Amino acid sequence: MLQQTLITDKVGAAHWVLALFSLILMSSIVLAVKPAYAGMGSAEERIAPVGEVRLQGQPPAEIAPAPAELETEDVDLAAAPQPGRKDYPNIGMSSRAIVWVLAQMHLFFGALVLAVPLFVLMIELVGVYTDDDRYDDMAHEFMKISLTGFSITAIFGGSLTLALFMLYPDFMGYMMHVFGTQVLVYASLFFFESFFLYTYYYGWNAFRYGNLKWVHLTLGLLLNASGLTIMVLANSWATFMMAPSGVNEVGAVVGNIWEIMKGPLWNPINLHRFVANIAFGGAVVGAYAAFKFLSSKDPETRAHYDWMGYTSNFIAILAFLPLPFAGYWLMAEIYAYSQQMGITAMGGILAWLFIVQAVLIGTILLAGNFYLWSGMSRTEGSVRYKGLIKVIAFVLVVSFLIWVTPHTLILSASEISLLGGSHHHILGPLGIMPAKNIAVNLMLIATFLSFQLYRRSDKVATVRWAPLGNALMVAVYVAAVVNIIFLGVYYGYFTNTVYKVGSSVAQVSTTLVVIVAGLVIDTLMFKKAKILPSHWGRIPDRSQYALFALPIAFTWLMALMGYVRSSVKTHWHVYTVMKDNSPDNFIPTIGYAGNMITLVTILFLLCVLFMFWVANLSGSKQPQPAAGGKA
Amino acid sequence: MEQDNNMRIGSRLLAGLIAIIIMLVIFYGLDHLVMGMQGLPLNLDLSPAG
Amino acid sequence: MSVLFKTLGFSLALTLLFTLVTYLLPQVKGEAPVEKKVDLGSLTMEDFIAMGDDIFHNKGTCTLCHKPAPLGRAPDIEGGDMAVMAAERLKDARYKGEAKDVESYLRESLIDPSKYVVAGWGKKGSNDSESPMPHVDKPPIQLSSMEIDAVIAWLQAKDGNEVTVALPSPEAAAEVAAASTGGDAGKAPAPVATAAEALVKYACVSCHAMDSKDILVGPGLVDVGSRLGIKELRQSIIDPNAVVAEGFTPAMPSDFASKMTVKELEMIVNYLAEKKG
């Protein structure tokens, strides 16, 4: 009884704290935003002299207020600055290289610390509903290992800001002018994020059960909300640079802050980064699990980290499957905004990059699938799927090869004359999008099939309509593959461009139908299924390397896409509005980009190792030296 | 007994075939729907209209 | 420890593999357009056509979209005869533009591509009413009128057709020089063609009511033509603080003289002179 009262009191107190908190939150937002809307007082009122010096007999000097108002109007119509080459500070090193490294490191860690609380919250919820402590403990562990990441994000963010102001003052002055108070709102959100982060993490065991657990989940939700808001605010700066909105042809601000933020690329980037962050976060914590698995000999510890690795891979691949759709939407919006920008990315100077992307995504899918197949050895029911796995592997490899095939071959002059051109007459057609769309969709379907088989491998269906359900599932896969190949070949090679592009949406919808159908049929078919024993920890060591390959490929891919995002603006700071006249205003070669990307990937790897090490450090205790002896 | 098995296999194959045909029809409809939504109408034989 | 080394080694090896892939690809640098000095005195038609060829393939970024089928996102230019194509387009019932000959059709297609969209090449969902082609005289391509002339000259010459474009004159060159340096280029977009556009461009309408005597910041101008003569109108724009209307404080921007072209000033002055209330 006393305990009940105490809990009720605590909840009551919690409610008051939350109410007070919301009040503070709302008033600070109002205070932050108010100055933008309260008219600026006249110059005379704000800087009226206390006293003035004048000759005896002379009338007091008049300060006309009207011009101040007109100046405001003039300032609002100010065009974007056009700095010349010498207006850019020179510190003896490529300014772009410095900003590139700092920005990419900030984005890596930003992505990580936004993603982890997302799936931590989901896992914690699962723990509440299943009443299984293991989920709660794993969620807690994920938070622990990523905690230092928040500081690292802030460190790189602060350095990035300083570097930007120092090296690109005119550009930053313009961006601050355009975005105004929004930047301060962004800054204020870090107070909230830190508050929710510390209360969420350090209060984990204090708010463990009953109503307090719901308080804890709310803190986690608010942590995610502030993180998400931080991300979409920052995204608006990047998308403004690519596709400016709310400004006129010369960059003068003519719209309000919503018009400035809500450009054509904002929401596609928001969705793409939101989903990609989750995949990335899952991959990174999976590497931690793999490392701990390999480092321990104790079967129970190995079982724990095997399960953690599986969960991480599950999160990473599950979030990865819809990612091509989000990326496609982004590219479609880029093409709609400026066909020129779209083609620069995929048909012009940056086109080769997407072959590298194919290599990376192929690595991700192959690694993810390989891990799933290796994991099948945890269960006895997986033996029946061995044959099917060979088929999946074959489809994956062939599709990957098609995806990687370029349209234009890299040949020497003599090779070109031998071939009769720079395109191979058989392999050449595999280099354009229709073939690649077929390949990608088949790879996604194959990966989903691996997933489905793995999920089924520890169950035996007991429902009477199981054979029909399986027949339907097979039909879904067969018909989908036929449809995808038909769409790609017919519209890709025998109709005009507009239908060719449109057919990829139909292909993607087909893949979605497969995924949804698979999930629905399996949920229904395996109700009250017989569960076969599965042994966590029973997985070959080499499978863990797949869990290392995943974050490396993801990291490298993220940096590669950052290179595209920045280069697609060609020689503009803000596309069509503010030209880039710096010494670095050219698109660097892909080899140079490769070096930069590898540099940041290695830096990231080292920082993540540090992050994991610190997490483990807090749990270790040096034994006290024996009395009378030195340590 | 063997006849039973054959029949079961036969009816399974039939069920599978019918399922595939049904799914192909569903995807045919999906193609029309998705292409139509983008302003790219199709004829009944799935060739571009207009 | 050995786990750490194996992990690091594997990760590093994979990273370097990706790097290797980038080394194997063609290394292309995307240079920003550079200002080129053209000596008009010695410019021949051949040089001019060569300039157009260079712009088409580089600064103009035309070849991004104008490629042969099936890759092209715009009609193939290099493979077709421009005079023949232009004549066909002009005869099309859907053609609603103002061009009458090959040169004006080409110029119109560059500056206002949506005036006429070749069937099948319009933006998706616009039923060929909107062109995905950017306006070539605006950012990001921003070709000057001299550069546009050069491109047209090349388009005509490449198929052996008659070149009807004239070589650039020194006045046009001065405009190019002003527009292609940094600095003021952003602040002064291409001069406008009508008085109405000029009034909007220089924001006259934000302080002066054009069709009434209402005072916004400055006096209403509906009858200004009957109050002020041409010389006074010109002075009130070039040197607004010389004579300020009674009851008003000096508030009109005094830098129009350095911003407006002579043509724009004259258009505005003539327009205002007509406003007799």
Image (spheres, rainbow, N blue to C red):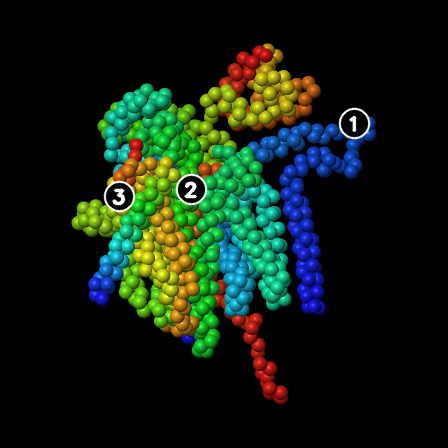
Inspect the image, locate mark 1, and give the three-letter code of the amino acid beneath it: Pro
- Residue A23 lies, with reference to residue C149, above or below; the image says below
Asked if both marks, 3 and 1, belong to the same chain, the answer given is yes
Give the x, y percent position of residue A226. Answer: 57, 53
How far apart are labels 3 and 1 at the CA level?
88 Å
Which is nearer the eye, A292 or C251? A292
Task: Give the residue drawn at x 58%, y 59%.
Answer: A217
Task: Give the residue drawn at x 30%, y 63%.
Answer: A389
Quarter of the image that includes the N terminus of chain B: bottom left
Quarter of the image that includes the C terminus of chain B: top left
How far apart are labels 1 and 2 at the CA level?
64 Å
Give the x, y percent position of residue A479. Answer: 29, 51
Q: Is residue A212 left or right of residue B34?
A: right
Task: Give the residue drawn at x 53%, y 61%.
Answer: A125
Q: Secondary structure at mark 1?
A: loop
Identify the chain of the residue marked 1, using the numbered disc in the image: A
Q: Residue tagged by mark 1? A: A59
Identify the chain of the residue marked 3, using the numbered disc in the image: A
Give the x, y percent position of residue C240. Answer: 61, 22
- Residue C197 lies, with reference to residue C36, above or below; the image says above
Identify the chain of the residue marked 2, using the numbered disc in the image: A
Q: Is residue B27 left or right of residue A257?
A: left
Q: Secondary structure at mark 3?
A: helix
Mark 3 near mark 2, Cβ–Cβ under 8 Å? no
Residue A333 image label: 2
The answer to whether residue A149 of the structure is visible from this angle is no
Q: Residues within 10 Å of mark 1 (few under 14, many from 20)?
A: few
Task: Give the residue drawn at x 74%, y 29%.
Answer: A62
How far apart are labels 3 and 2 at the CA level?
25 Å
Q: Residue tagged by mark 3? A: A490
Inspect the image, locate mark 2, and give the three-letter code of the amino acid beneath it: Glu
